[in-house]
Structures are given as C-alpha cells and as structure tokens.
Image (tube, rainbow, N blue to C red):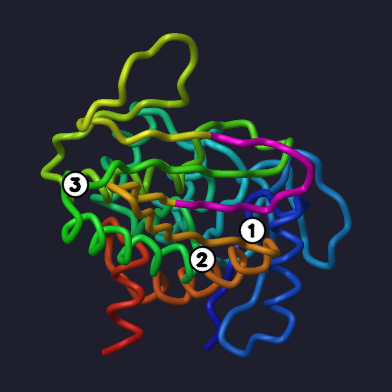
Amino acid sequence: MSVKILLCGACGKMGGNVLSLLAGDNEAVAVCGVDLYPREIGIPVYKSFADVKEEIDVIIDFSSPVGLVERLDYAKTRGAGIVLASTGFTAEDLETINAYAKDVPIFKTANLSLGVNLMQALCKAAAEVLGDGFDVEIIERHHNLKKDAPSGTALMLADTLNEAFGNQKRYVNGRSGIVGAREKTEIGIHAVRGGTIVGEHEVMFAGEDEIITISHSARSKRVFATGAIRAAKFLAKKEAGMYEMKHLLAEENK
C-alpha cells in the first residue's frame, strides 16, 4: 500500500519538485497539501491543517519554522510522522521538536541530499586523521532569497567536525576588521548569497604547504525532493522518536 503524504508548503518550489517525482512513484502518493497561499496543483490544498479531510501517513514539511507547533500537533493527533525539511530552527524550536519526538516519528536533517550526508562522513574522517595540524574553514553558497545564514547544512558540518575534535572548537561566522591571528580553536564559517545558486558547501583543511578540500554542489532542488520522499517512506514504518539520514542509510544498506 502506498504511503499517503501531506505536503506542507505544497505550492512552493520544493512542493512542486516532490509532486513531480511522486507522479512516477508506486510506493508513495501525495494525497493533499497545506499552504498559506493555496492554488491548483493537482491535489487538494488547504490553508490550514484544520481543514484537511484526507487520511495521511506522513507530512513532508518544506515550509518554514513558523507554525511548527501546529504541524507537530497535527502529526501527533493523526498518528502521522513528519519530515522536517526546513532549516532556521531556534534553540527553543529544537527543544519543542525533541519533546514531540516522544509521541511522533520525526525525521529531521539539515540536508536531504545523499551526497551531503556522504560529505559529512568524509569530513569527520578527515578531521580525525588530520587533527589540529590543519585549520578548518567552511564556505557555503546559496541563492539570494535564502533567509538564514549560515545554512543549516554548514552548521551540521561544523557540528560533525567539532565532534571529531572533542567539541573543543568555537565557531567564527565570517571575519571583519583587525581580528588578529587565527586561533587553532576556530572553525570558520562563511556564507555567500547570490543569484540562483541551489546550494554549495565546501570544507577546507588548510595545513602547512597543503590544502585538502571536500565539497558538494547541488545542481537542482530535485535532490532534496528525492531525499524527502525516501525519508517519508522510511518514517511511515517507524515508532515515535527522532530519526535522521544516518538511520535511513543504515536501514537501506542492511
């Protein structure tokens, strides 16, 4: 039986990408959507979760952190899972998400791309081998409409690297003025915004007389839509709890 999906932010670009991919999918189907600005997209779209009539298994949320509690409440009431595919959550939002995970299957990741999650693993391995002999800088590039900076993916990479360093590093978001010599305790994070860049992330390990760079470039938003659908199928079979890409990949590669 197909996994029944509700798309939150259904009328946006990511909602369109998910709908396009689901058109040829035999294991999942979009049954309805919720969007602040409903329009005709081939499935019923409601302005509020209170208006939804369809039975659902999983919510794919590509909207924004605004209205987070409403979406989590709906998932809890309907016994549905939720894939949180947006970024920009505050510390308070994260506490709320963790609290709801006691009753709701929640899939949360800063990036749904398989390539980025492989990059994350490679960066951790590199940090463990190179140690403090190399300075680490993260450069992320996105389109000029992106609202949060640094990107959730850049922070995810920074956290992964810091874990490899025993959480002894501090994050420096850009540099300006007379900042003095770079300290070994720093992980630099730099945000670039311009044009229609989908998403690019680069981690540079700069040592004495050599530089190692690990990078990923998304050429289309479809890679994130593909990941969201995979996450929804995975989550439909899960009990309440917090899940991320490493759990999905471990299950797919059993």
Q: In this rendering, which labeled residue sits more in front, label 1 or label 2? A: 2
Which residue of the protein is positioned furthest toward the right in this rendering? 40
User: In which image quadrant can residue 47 be found?
Assistant: top right
Q: Which residue is identified by label 2?
A: 113
The magenta stretch is 191-202
Work out whether 166 lies above or below 183: below
Instruction: Of the two numbered discs 2 and 3 on the same chain, state the one appearing first in sequence.
Output: 2
The image shows residue 45 at horizontal and vertical percentages of: 76, 54
Q: Nearer the viewer, residue 70 or 210?
A: 210
Q: Secondary structure at mark 1?
A: strand
Q: Nearer the viewer, mark 3 or mark 1?
A: 3
- Place of residue 243 in the rendered image (x, y in percent of width and height, measured from the top left): 31, 61
The quadrant the C terminus occupies is bottom left
Q: Taking 161 as reference, is 154 left or right?
A: right
Q: Earlier in the sequence, mark 3 or mark 1?
A: 1
Task: Give the residue drawn at x 45%, y 53%.
Answer: 75
Q: How many marks?
A: 3
* Image depth: mark 2 or mark 3 in front: 3
- Please say whether residue 1 is one of the residues in the magenta stretch: no
Task: Tell me which residue sits at (51%, 66%) in the image.
Answer: 113
Give the residue type that dot 2 points to. Answer: Ser
Q: Amino acid at mark 3?
A: Gly
Q: Which residue is mark 3?
A: 133
Label 1 crowd (10 A; few <14 / some 14-19 / many >=20): many
**Mark before the other along the chain sequence, 1 or 2:** 1
Q: Mark number for residue 7?
A: 1
Residue at point 34% right, 41% down? 97
**Mark 2 nearby-residue class (10 Å; few <14, some 14–19, many ≥20):** many
Q: Quadrant of residue 91?
A: top left
